[in-house]
Amino acid sequence: MEGIWYAHFNTGTNQGNGLAVLRNGELLGGDPQHTYVGTYREDGAHLYADVRVAPYAGAGLPVDVEHPFSLVLTGLIAGDTATISGHPNHHPDVTVRVDLRKGV
């Protein structure tokens, strides 16, 4: 799992792209509006991540989601791709899906 990963996220009608660096159990990344800081672990083909998502100062973001927020994501690894999903804290009605593709 270690390396630089292209991340495409989908939360229903909201979509975006970013980069995530996974190294030694640590996850760091960002997209045009957020930074990601967290941890990950893999168990065979299973991937688990705990991520804190925070907006950049002045980013125009929806007011119906509390910021920053935490995500607990689980999913599967398939070679140089992985798909993980979960829910933001306090919003079990919102599903976040992240498709990862290894860059380096």
Image (cartoon, rainbow, N blue to C red):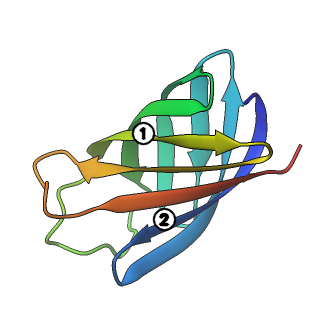
Dot 1 amino acid type: Thr
Taking depth in this image into account, of 54 and 73 the one nearest to the observer is: 73
Mark 2 nearby-residue class (10 Å; few <14, some 14–19, many ≥20): some
Which residue of the protein is positioned furthest toward the top in this rendering?
24
Q: Nearer the viewer, residue 51 or 63?
A: 51
Relative to 80, 71 lies left or right: left
Residue 44 sits above or below residue 91 on the image: above
Q: Nearer the viewer, mark 1 or mark 2?
A: 1
Q: Are marks 1 and 2 in contact (CB under 8 Å)?
A: no
Q: Residue furthest bottom?
A: 13
Q: Residue at x 76, y 28 (%)?
A: 2
Image quadrant where residue 51 sits: top left
Q: Where is residue 103 drawn, in percent x and y? A: 85, 50
Residue 62, how many percent across, how many down? Answer: 24, 75
Label 1 crowd bin: few (<14), some (14–19), many (20+), radius 10 Å: some
Residue 12 vertical placement versus 3 (above, below): below
The image position of residue 25, as x and y in percent, is 60, 18
Q: Residue at x 68, y 31 (%)?
A: 22
Image disc number at residue 100: none
- Name the amino acid, label 2: Gln
Q: Which mark is residue 33?
A: 2
Which residue is more in the foreground, 57 or 30? Answer: 30
Quadrant of residue 6 within the rendered picture: bottom right
Residue ID for mark 1: 74
Dividing the picture into quarters, in which one does residue 46 lie?
top right
Q: Quadrant of the C terminus?
A: top right
